[in-house]
């Protein structure tokens, strides 16, 4: 049964909610520049709630030399781009199995035109990295 | 969501990251940085009816009024 607040409108969670979560999960990536791996943009007449995000990075094979590598979740709201979650390794971490992970629970809202994105980067030479990232998003009528 | 192969843009820097010129996508695996192509999953309602390529008109309607997407020639090359 849909729930109403004191207003005549249904609560956002009952206004045709649709799961729009995005995920990027790959086992062994060679070094590459900053790459937007996945993105979600809120359509017209919609809003979205971000309720969680996570990033994890691990060394799959050693680099020579290692560079800075990371996976980040970015939020672009009102044309301002900012990092929400950042799991990055420095060049000193280059042993197979080294892991860094960050996860957060959130509850904030995106308006039409705002976006949430997953980026990866690796400035090393050779070697591979495992990247995992996800953003939990629910879209609903504005 | 439907998987298609598209070209991507950018130079891999923080000012100009590699990215697909679409509002809503997820890369599958790694990109081909030499040929600048990548396989992505895109929502069905942003593709042509045969789901073979992004549909500029449908994207403009879905994201109407938004500076980045409600404009001509917005769609990534296939």
Image (cartoon, coloured by chain):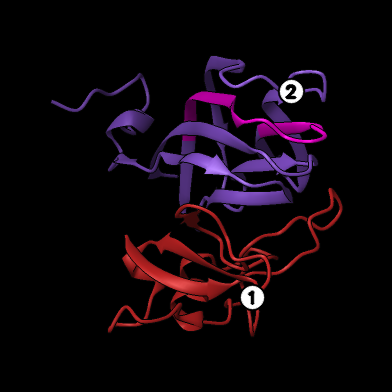
Chain colours: A purple, B red
Q: Is residue A75 left or right of residue A6?
A: right
Subunit ID for the residue under disc 2: A
Q: Residue at x 67, y 37 (%)?
A: A74
Q: Is residue A66 magenta?
A: yes
Name the residue tied to disc 2.
Answer: A89
Q: Locate the C terminus of chain A by quadrant.
A: top left
* Above or below for B57 versus A71: below
Q: Is residue B50 magenta?
A: no
The percent position of residue A140, horizontal first and vertical second, equals: 37, 42
Q: Locate the N terminus of chain A by quadrant.
A: top left
Q: Residues in magenta?
A: A49-71
The kind of secondary structure element at disc 1 is loop
Q: Is residue B60 left or right of residue A139?
A: right
Which of the two residues, A24 or B25, is positioned nearer the viewer here?
Answer: A24
* Above or below for A140 versus A67: below
Q: Residue at x 47, y 41 (%)?
A: A26
Q: Is residue B41 left or right of residue A41?
A: left
* Above or below for A28 versus A68: below
Q: Do the residues at discs 1 and 2 belong to one chain? A: no
Occupied quadrant, residue A6? top left
Neighbourhood count class around disc 2 (C-alpha, 10 Å): few under 14, some 14–19, many 20 upward:
many
Which of the two residues, A84 or A45, is positioned nearer the viewer here?
Answer: A84
The percent position of residue A70, horizontal first and vertical second, equals: 70, 32
The numbered mark at residue B35 is 1
């Amino acid at each position: 049964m849909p729930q109403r607040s004191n207003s005549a409108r249904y609560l956002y969670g009952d206004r045709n909610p649709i799961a729009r979560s995005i995920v990027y999960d790959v086992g062994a990536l060679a070094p590459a520049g900053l790459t937007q791996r996945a993105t979600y943009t809120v359509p017209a007449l919609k809003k979205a709630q971000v309720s969680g995000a996570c990033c994890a990075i691990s060394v799959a094979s050693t680099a020579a030399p290692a560079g800075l590598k990371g996976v980040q979740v970015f939020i672009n709201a009102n044309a301002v781009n900012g990092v929400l979650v950042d799991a990055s390794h420095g060049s000193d971490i280059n042993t197979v199995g080294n892991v860094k992970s960050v996860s957060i629970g959130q509850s904030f809202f995106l308006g039409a035109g705002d976006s949430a994105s997953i980026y990866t980067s690796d400035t090393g030479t050779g070697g591979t990295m495992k990247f995992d990232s996800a953003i939990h998003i629910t879209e609903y009528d504005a | 969501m439907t998987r298609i192969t598209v070209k991507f843009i950018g130079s891999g820097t923080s000012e100009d990251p590699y990215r697909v010129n679409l509002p809503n996508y997820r890369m599958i695996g790694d990109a081909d940085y030499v040929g600048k192509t990548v396989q992505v999953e895109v929502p069905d309602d942003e593709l042509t009816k045969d789901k073979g390529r992004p549909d500029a008109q449908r994207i403009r309607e879905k994201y109407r009024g938004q500076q980045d997407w409600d404009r001509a020639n917005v769609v990534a090359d296939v």
